[in-house]
Amino acid sequence: MNERIKRLREQSLRAKASVSLERAMLLTEFYDSGQAERVSVPVARALAFRYLLEHKEVCINPDELIVGERGPAPKATPTYPEICTHSLNDFEVLHNREKVSFQVPDDARKLQRDAIIPFWSGRSIRDRIFAEVDAEWRAAYQAGVFTEFQEQRAPGHTVLDDKIYQKGMLQFKDDIADSIAALDMYSDSNAIDKWEELTAMNISADALIAYAKRHAGKLRDLAEEESNSARKDELRQMTTICDRVPAEAPRNFHEALQYYWFVHLGVITELNTWDSFNPGRLDQHLLPFYRRDVESGVLTEEGARELLQAFWIKFNNQPAPPKVGVTAEESNTYTDFCLINLGGVKETGEDAANDLTYLILDVIEEMRLLQPSSMGQVSKKSPDRLLSRALDIIKTGYGQPSLFNTDAIVPELVRQGKSIIDARNGGASGCVEAGAFGKEAYILTGYFNLVKVLEITLHNGIDPRTGDEIGIRTGDPKAFESFDELYAAYEQQLRHFVDIKIKGNRIVERLWAKYLPAPFLSILINDCVANGKDYNDGGARYNTSYVQGVGTGSVTDCLSAIKYHVFDEKHFDMSTLLAALEANFEGADDLRRQLLDETPKYGNDEEYVDEILRAVFESYFGCIDGRPNTRGGHHRINLLPTTCHVYFGSVVGAMPDGRVSGEPVSEGISPVQGADRHGPTAVLKSAAKIDHLRTGGTLLNQKFTPQLLADETGLTKVAHLVRSYFKMDGHHIQFNVVTAKTLREAQKNPEKHRDLIVRVAGYSDYFVDLGRNLQDEIILRTEHWHS
Amino acid sequence: MRHSNTTNGNGGAVSGIIFDLKKFALHDGPGIRTTVFFKGCPLDCWWCHNPEARKPQIESLCLKRSLSESDDVSHGETVGRRVTVDELMVEIMKDEVFYDQSGGGVTFSGGEPLMQVEFLRELLLASRSRGLHTTVDTSGYAPAEAFDRIDCLVDLFYYDLKIIDEATHQKYTGMSNRLILENFERLCQNGNRVQVRIPMIPGITDTDDNLEDTVRFIKPLSVITEIALLPYNRFGEDKWERFGMVSRLGDVAVPPEEVILARAERLRACGYTVSVGG
């Protein structure tokens, strides 16, 4: 990387994350002014958006090529009090905690206390959600049976397609005007709502144009003042760019990147969408600009590389907004899950890898930044070069890019009812979630704790942690005479909690649709403009609600242990087992050893237990898939944990897989840590027994020491491993390439290993920023390193 | 035709003793492989990496397992298990998708697989009938007739040429190498694909003389094009210790990488394809 990029990168790495109340104050000013009360909710949201973009500080950092920050400075992170309002205690924790801290300026505390909290208390969507959900939901939520994403983050989870590279905001405004003109005020009973929504979109489009012009203005001033003539020229050129985009469609590579960046800032300023928005298939979208510019001589490969690197740094400058209700231990993450997709197939079905794919891979390798995340979409048509180049970067131990199977993603999406063209233009985002980019609102609604459900089943509806009866009475397990009876009880309990979750989802969805529409985001996602309907209200072409299952491996091993030891081999009875669990295996070492070492475990390609895995999958799928949501779409499942398997483990006592109370449950579809003993091929075979094509994404983590990938032979064989998994319809695989020794060293001397990035689960994070539990777990995860 | 290429009626019921099965084996032949380790070996090499595999019987060994620096515990471990061809083939075939993708297959190693030649032959027949690439990793110490029973069922031989000088071989392995060298020549003359494997034990196999002898020996055999140098590591030593056995090797230093690479270069200069580390 050149000197400029080195400086910008350093600056981004050095910048400390902080809380900025700029957005919160502006928003509160706006809503306090009474303007909001005179208009419809969508129009009020649009006016608020305009107010934010008119008044927020314009930040242009020295030497930059792509401009615009969400906050007043790099990593100055706004809060979203209309969604959730930080308490003063939250601020203290965020400020003081060791990991993933956010500096809170002194005046922010005062403003929060005197202005923000009083205004938003009871009006934030979080407060509204907790007021509306019923006691059953609250009890299950508090017990840790499931989580709810939308209590803190907006229903984002969408990715942009290629539309902004063809149209400027002015053209989108034309589309909006056409849609308004086509409204049938005489026979469409929703015409007024549509008119309000479309008007809101129109205001939002103008707001983004004006925001860019403010940047152009500042750039013009900076150009005037600049004494270095080269920089002066750059600043002038950037002025022209910001005068042009996003109002008009981009004409070249630089304009395309800057346009996207303004759109990105718009989306993440309007609301704190989860997961963060991203450009998606970047190597496809930018290719025409790249080719044209290089051909006409206005851009060199080096120039493109520099711009991409500058673009990468912009992502790294935007940490994920800090949560509320945080505990000191809970570190979560700075990463906001922007997942750049590379490779895959074109909409015609042909292989999509191109020159730019490899150029972007170079950028990823060189930048080594936490954000954005990146992935390679590998189809059977993808050249080996794509996979081996990706592995080449993976082996450096930075955890990126992860690998996805296009030949699974496309049929997954098609099964859900998307057109094959929309499916091929899609990909994966966030951790591993499949989506039709630019056309779908695929909202993660919360993690679901399968292990907790089994624990409650083993206590006949009672949560042993609290003694509260939060489930239904599915029978005293001591009276069960067969494994089938136990399994039926588990399935019944599962359905009960899924029902509660889905009922809650409907309430949450309606609250968002009613109180916090997203008119700006709605411009960007088909067919919100044509439908005159908001993204949060089912305006998109496809509307999916996901419930993410967690602990598949753990619950399978628990059931396997019961079936094997209690029913099949009769090594001990249910009472003995339950007593040992209650005692957290105190005084039951031998029994625990049997559970750990002499039980068929998932991840070893063993039919006895993998049969149970299939059942666990079918039950979960059967409970959720196809149930309608309130946005005209359906509920679907995926199997991924982010870091929630740690939290879910903390609320579950000792379990029949030999896991002691409080330990993390298994993550994604990976086997329980250390349970896989026959190497990676066995893990992949077991994992492939899940029907990936009926999910919207699964997450499989594999850890390799760098030696395995050190030579060409190792690299090629790992590539074959990936291809084989994908042949079996595996959705995704990611590799952690580190040695346990390095990790232990890092634990002892974190300051020396600040740069150590590991793959956690669907994303990479700084190892030293992870909590001790998660660190320990990553060290423990079986190392598939063969001497 | 000397051998039938199909399993006879009850071949699947033939059993043998193995001491390990390793999936995702990356250094035992082309592609992703499963390696089956036969128990029992006629040689007694000082540097043996699998001392627990020497005896042909299933045995109970006391294994020291270090739980922490201060706390050594011992526990009995049964080494070896009897399995039938059918049972083993089920396990081997589990990774078929990986073999197909990578051009891999199955490797029979040990111990010395030819010590259980009927078992080996049935496994090779069963593997062949399922289209698997087969590799046999052998010390070469077996009756010529044993090789005759299997050679046309093997796609690739990994053949150890440890020491060419007979007396030295006798000293460090407990056996004369005459049979080994004769079998080697015969295999080559019959047109089998054979890769030479030389364990690099400093001062024993890894000497100027031995390597020169080796080249002189293989030179007339035009089918030999590949040589693998297997650098000495302490992994075996550690095993001797854990099984409470006394290694006669003493304190041998792991040879520096550049020494091995220099050896490899010299062999390449003689026209061979040389890999290091299998």
Image: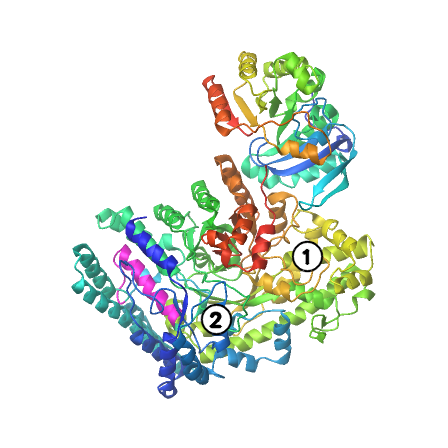
Q: What residue sits 59% from the left and 45% below the top?
A: A783
Relative to residue B117, is residue A112 depicted above or below? below
Q: Amino acid at mark 2?
A: Arg
Badge 2, how many Cα within 10 Å: few under 14, some, many 20+? many
Magenta-tinted stretch: A247-269
Q: Nearer the viewer, residue A187 or B25?
A: B25
Q: Is residue B129 above or below residue A756?
A: above
Tell me the tag on residue A556. 1
Residue A168's quadrant in the figure? bottom left
Regarding residue A622, the answer to whether it shows in the image is: no
- Give how far across and how far down residue A207 sits, in percent: 30, 74
The spot of residue B10 in percent (x, y) is: 78, 31
Residue A153 is labelled as 2
Q: Residues within 10 Å of mark 1 (few under 14, many from 20)?
A: many
| Rendered position, A367 above or below A527 | above
User: Taking B16 as reference, is A91 left or right?
Assistant: left
Is A589 on the left-hand or right-hand side of A269?
Answer: right
Q: How many angstroms separate mark 2 from mark 1 (CA)? A: 31 Å
Kindly state the secondary structure of the residue where label 2 is placed.
Answer: loop
Q: Is residue B114 or residue A284 the one in the foreground? A: B114
Q: Is residue A670 visible?
A: yes
Quarter holding residue A677: top right
Secondary structure under badge 1? helix
Q: Chain of mark 2?
A: A
| The C terminus of chain A sits in image quarter | top right
* Chain on which label 1 sits: A
Is A561 one of the magenta-colored residues? Answer: no
Does residue B160 appear to the left or right of B269 in the view shown? right
Of pointers 2 and 1, the one earlier in the residue sequence: 2
The reply to whether the magenta stretch includes residue A263 is: yes
